[in-house]
Amino acid sequence: MDKVGVYICSGYGIGEALDLEALKQVAETELKAEVVKIVGSVEAEDLELINQEVAAEGINRLVVAGPTFRFYPKNAFPASVMVDYVNLREQVAWAHEPNNEDTQALAADNLRMGVTRVRKMAPLEPVPECNSINKDILVVGGGPAGLTAAYYLAKASKKVILFERKLSVGGGMWGGGVMFNEIVVQAEGKRILDEFGIRSVPFEDDYFSADSVETVSTMCSQACKAGAKIFNLFSVEDVMLTEGRVTGLVINWSAVDIARLHVDPITIRAKAVIDATGHAAEVANVIQRKSGVRLDTPSGKIEGERPMWAEVGEKMIVENTREFFPGVFAAGMCCNAIYGAPRMGPVFGGMLMSGKKVAEMILARLMTKPE
Ligand SMILES: Cc1cc2nc3c(=O)[nH]c(=O)nc-3n(C[C@H](O)[C@H](O)[C@H](O)COP(=O)(O)OP(=O)(O)OC[C@H]3O[C@@H](n4cnc5c(N)ncnc54)[C@H](O)[C@@H]3O)c2cc1C
């Protein structure tokens, strides 16, 4: 029996910018969440209190509406609970005019999407055995986002396969920023480079640069050493979609595709698929084009990438790293194409952070075992 709990945070400037009682009403009366509370913060003792209440009330689907998901410590909530984070701080209270009708409407819409998402979430159950190959996670695209995701998932002992259409992995990262063979990352991106053992040097305030060739080759090497299996020269041409969720991929040799040969494709099943195909968002596109289902976006369709706005684009790429259809997660540049956020300047940190986030999300979901 599902029980939805919604915790709306009044701290961090959110309570000053929004009518939280009105939001509570939306969650209670319209969204019919079983437990709805306004809390002062989502850290320290307040976080402990939320968790105590979640256990006492038997909440198994939780929406926390407050700061960005990045604010929360790892394992902030028990593995048995499905969690969705609604960002009322950076994306609403801090970004829009306070105490304004439209800002309030945006907050209410975000809350509606969060509650809908958490109700629809399903554990990443093992897929039934059949004649195709079974893996834990399939990554489509070997650019920076896909390689980062494959590395962290393999490091956590998951069975990961990454498919890359081209001869070489690395996607758009080989050329660095505008073909100067240097990539630039933010401080958070640098921490990921450090984990891979990639050298970087300070560039400007809070920015660091690294050699793009060293970065791609080291990421590829570390992902392989961690246990990820990379198949280059394979194109993902379709998904397996059963009972409303993606359960695997349909792949073929890229050469077969280029030569337009009539050669049967191969199917591979998995608990989760990652679309890391860059701007093209190829997995999302094939789902939309062929199955006519609703994606988990405001319009139910691919929203399309917006024009350049570097600062916002960088942040949004991590925010938009999500499960956009049951069983499929977006990582890297395709996140902004799917969710309609701006493209950005030649900073690659967002791709690495997105790859790491998608791995963490999937690992958390693989641990989720509803009672
Ligand atoms: C048209 C274009 C515009 C760009 N604009 C920007 C920009 O505005 N800002 C910016 O920072 N950078 C831009 N870049 C640079 C750079 O590509 C990205 O920032 C970065 O590389 C994206 O990382 P990613 O991991 O998301 O995807 P990518 O690096 O693009 O990697 C995706 C990989 O997936 C593979 N792939 C795609 N479809 C399939 C499939 N069906 N099967 C198997 N493999 C597949 C591709 O071959 C590729 O290697 C642009 C690149 C291009 C080509």
Image (cartoon, rainbow, N blue to C red):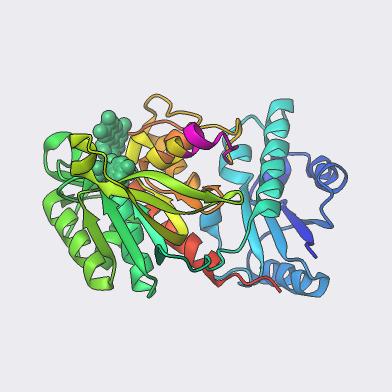
Write the residue at 37% across / 32% down.
343
* Nearest the eye: 77 or 123: 123
56 in relation to 231, above or below: below
Magenta residues, as a range?
287-295
Write the residue at 39% across / 71% down.
158
Whether residue 348 is visible here, answered yes or no, is: no
Viewed as shown, does residue 131 lie left or right of 148?
right
Whether residue 334 is visible here, answered yes or no, is: yes
Residue 267 image offset from top left, x and y in percent: 38, 55
* Nearest the eye: 72 or 287: 287
Disc count in the image? 0
Q: Where's the C terminus, which quadrant?
A: bottom right
Residue 305 image offset from top left, x and y in percent: 42, 29
Viewed as shown, does residue 183 lie left or right of 23?
left
Viewed as shown, does residue 144 lie left or right of 166?
right
Is residue 290 found inside the magenta-colored segment of the image?
yes
Q: Quadrant of residue 196?
A: bottom left
* Nearest the eye: 298 or 370: 370
Write the residue at 45% across / 28% down.
304
Q: Residue furthest top?
A: 307
Residue 255 image offset from top left, x and y in percent: 18, 42
Ligand number 1: quarter of image: top left
Residue 124 image offset from top left, x and y in percent: 55, 63
Is residue 241 found inside the magenta-colored segment of the image?
no
Q: Where's the N terminus, which quadrant?
A: bottom right
Write the residue at 61% across / 33% down.
298
